[in-house]
Amino acid sequence: MKKKHIFIKTFFLAALFNFVACDDDTDLAASDVPKAVEQTFNSMFANVHPQWELENKLYKAEFFQDGHEFEACFNSDGSWSHTYKDVYINELPEPVTNYVSTKYADYRIDDSKLVKTPTTEYYQLELERNGKRDRILRLSATGEEM
């Protein structure tokens, strides 16, 4: 019984170590964010107080604005990379919801984001069926797959 107990503790400690080791995000103080990044952020998003992380060489600001959660990412030179905005299902454009209800009638939308980059804008939808995530869709506001 004691060996089983030690095995279980060892297993959970190893699992916890692996989980932490796989996390490539580094939390940052606002003072550690390059001035160019801070300036670009402030020009795009007024009156918000982000939590900053360094993730895959991008400076990521997480914040809430107008009842939505945002993630805005910037390169170290201050150039904007992309933004994710959590979108409520009832805020999705009608062509998007029509596309899903027509092409994926047995799925439900589990999560939805508006993704903006310097060159494009689309809705990223996470669809699930029977409680399991099954599909990720990228749709334009006109309901076309991208």
Image (tube, rainbow, N blue to C red):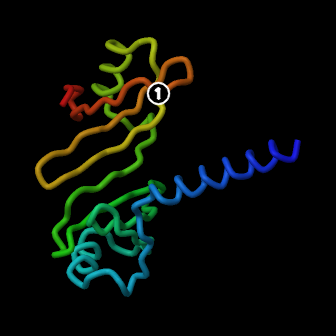
Query: Which is more toward the observer, 61 or 32?
Result: 32
User: Label 1, on which residue?
Assistant: 133
Query: Which is more toward the observer, 96 or 21?
Result: 21
Q: Residue at x 45, y 58 (%)?
A: 23
- Give left or right: position of 146 versus 1: left
Q: Residue at x 36, y 35 (%)?
A: 92
Residue 142 screen position, x and y as percent:
21, 29
Residue 51 screen position, x and y as percent:
45, 71
Residue 25 screen position, x and y as percent:
41, 64
Q: Residue furthest right?
A: 1
The type of residue carrying mark 1 is Arg
Instruction: Indicate the quadrant where residue 100 lies.
Output: top left
- Give left or right: position of 31 versus 78: right
Q: Is residue 100 above or below residue 43?
A: above
Q: Is residue 70 above or below residue 32?
A: above
Q: Residue at x 40, y 32 (%)?
A: 126
